[in-house]
Amino acid sequence: MDKRKKSARFRYSSEQVIDKPFNWSQIIRLFGYMKPYSKNLLPKAFLAMMVTTAVRLAVPVFIGVLTFDHAIKNKDTSLLIKLIIAISALYLISWGANTLRIRWMNYLGQYVIYDIRQHLFKHIQRLSHRFFDQRSAGSILVRIINDVNSLQDLFTNGVINVLMDVIMLFGIIVIMFVYSPELTLAIMVILPLMFFISTSLRKKIRRSWQVVRIKQAKLNSHLNESIQGIRVTKSYTQEKENMSFFNGVNNETYDSWKTATQQNALFRPFVEMSNAIGTAILLWFGAYLIQGEALEIGVFVTFAFYLGMFWEPISRLGQVYNQLLVGMASSERIFEFLDEQPNVHEKKGAFEFSRIKGEIEFKNVEFSYDDKRKALKGIDLTIGAGQTVALVGHTGSGKTTIANLVSRFYDPTSGDVLIDGVNLKDASLGSLREKVSVVLQDTFIFSGTIIENIRFGRPDATDEEVKNASKAVGAHAFIEKLSDGYETEVEERGNVLSVGERQLLSFARALLADPDILILDEATASIDTESEQKIQTALMTLLNGRTAIIIAHRLSTIREADNIVVLDHGEIIEQGNHNELMDDEGVYYHLVVSQFKMLDAI
């Protein structure tokens, strides 16, 4: 099988080449990031550019007309020396101004890239869970890193260079017309053909850079999946197969870059060919005019300088246009994210929770993740303040969805969720989530020290408070045995820790935050029996007076819950305490019996 065909496994729905005309409004929006620097760096760079341009336009006149037609022709040595000094001074001024222009534009480019990346990351932090559910981590990284980086040349070189080159071209044409309209028109005859051919290249170049961005997103997504899933890959000895897929994706990325750079490369040789034709016209027609005494030698030399200078800005303008195409391809993807709005909105003047008693109420709540299949169907549920409620049911029954709605990671499709009588749609997200802690089965450990990870939800906690929280959940003992205790460095996802140890850290993190509502979503699923017994003992004290929602497949962990809610396909089919449900001999009873039979079999 062709390796490139195998990479189809990693095609994503976002892979679309956007085929629409050049969007100047989008480029203007992109350049809006330069506004904060419009009173400092931009004027400085513009002034330096004007000085450089003026000097470069003046030098050919000094060399050609003044030197040849006046100093040399009239054998005026004094004037020649003065002209040499003046030309040297002009070159020195140009060098200084150009150095400052480059320095200031580099500063400007770096500042703008910093601002765009900061804005994009800040915006992504505000987006709802649904956004991350629909995109891979790799594709998000491409937008924040690759797409933003690709704008660097545009802001560093493109903006001021465009102005400089346009002014340069206009100045050259005006000066050439002043000295010889006939020779100027003869040289410019090549321009219409050049304009026609360059226009035909634009669409191809733009589409090719869009394809590059798409292939990069695929490559990053596959790399992210491969690294995160390396244990599964090795467990099933699929390294060779995985490498084969990577080769396919890598080849596609390479081919897209190759195509884009080849199309870019067509422009400069075309400009050089135009320059060669223009030079031939200058030599032929210029010689003709000199022989007819219609043109001075000095003017001819000046034209030769200007002709060399003329095609240089045209070539650079082509490169800038390519930068604009790259910038547009990247900005389309960046603005796609920036235009994303959170699915969960916070109203103006939203209610701020100062303290939560913990009464939770679901009123005829329905919810769907994809607007097709309902995850919850008409849920009516009341959880009293300080109660511990367990959610039980098969996978896909709606347990985690209920927890997500309490944390307001999502809003109900219909119906209302209230805490202490306040509809969560009217509440401040920040004040709500400060009072609700969620402990997941798959614990995320950040790069840093143990103490920093525990303190994540409450950065101002003292070392003593961190240790007390760790002791309460039984994590203190194993932390003290680590090489540097609480100052032990752990890598991303805490690979130096066992699954159970990572889970204990997440308990300590949640309890240190001192939430009014605690949600445990399969939080004890990965903990051994001995650790689980320790945690259960700690939770009996820690959950006292605090509303808790426990989601667990291990029914032994929820026996002491005040209320056990049994869910099936998004509906509540039973609820009550352990003894009541066992006496009813319904679904819960059979779940308990089947689990204990499995344990006996083991």
Image: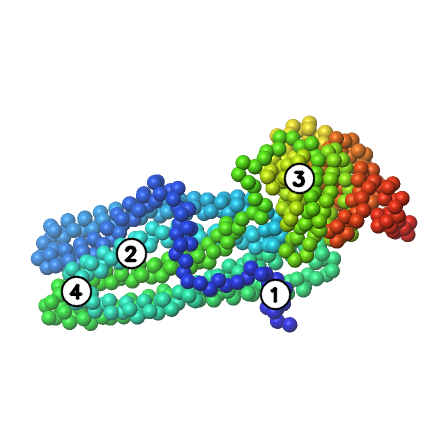
- Mark 3 or 1 closer to N-term? 1
Depth check, mark 3 against mark 1: the one in front is: 3
Q: Position of residue 516 (x, y in %)?
A: 69, 33
At 68% from the left and 47% from the top, the residue drawn is: 365
Residue at x 57% of width, y 55% of height: 139
Which residue is identified by label 3?
418
The nearer-to-camera label among 2 and 3 is: 3
- Name the kind of residue labelled 2 in the image: Val
Determine which quarter of the picture holds residue 547: top right
Q: Label 3 amino acid?
A: Leu
Residue 408: give x, y in percent of width and height: 64, 43
The residue beneath circle 2 is: 166
Label placed on residue 181 = 4
Q: Could you tell whether 184 is left or right of 200 in the image?
A: left
Mark 4 residue type: Pro
Of callouts 4 and 3, the N-terminal one = 4
Image side of residue 508 versus residue 532, left or right = left
Direction left: furthest residue: 74
Residue 283, compared with residue 169, is above or below; it is: below
Q: Distance from label 4 to label 2 (Cα)?
A: 20 Å
Residue that appears at 68% across and 57% down: 373
Q: Which element is circle 1 on?
A: helix
Q: How is the image coloured?
A: rainbow
Sequence order check, earlier mark of 2 and 3: 2
Q: Position of residue 168 (x, y in %)?
A: 26, 56
Left or right position of 483 against 283: right
Label 2 with label 1: CB-CB less than 8 Å: no
Question: CA–CA distance between discs 2 and 3?
Answer: 62 Å
Q: Which residue is mark 1?
A: 7
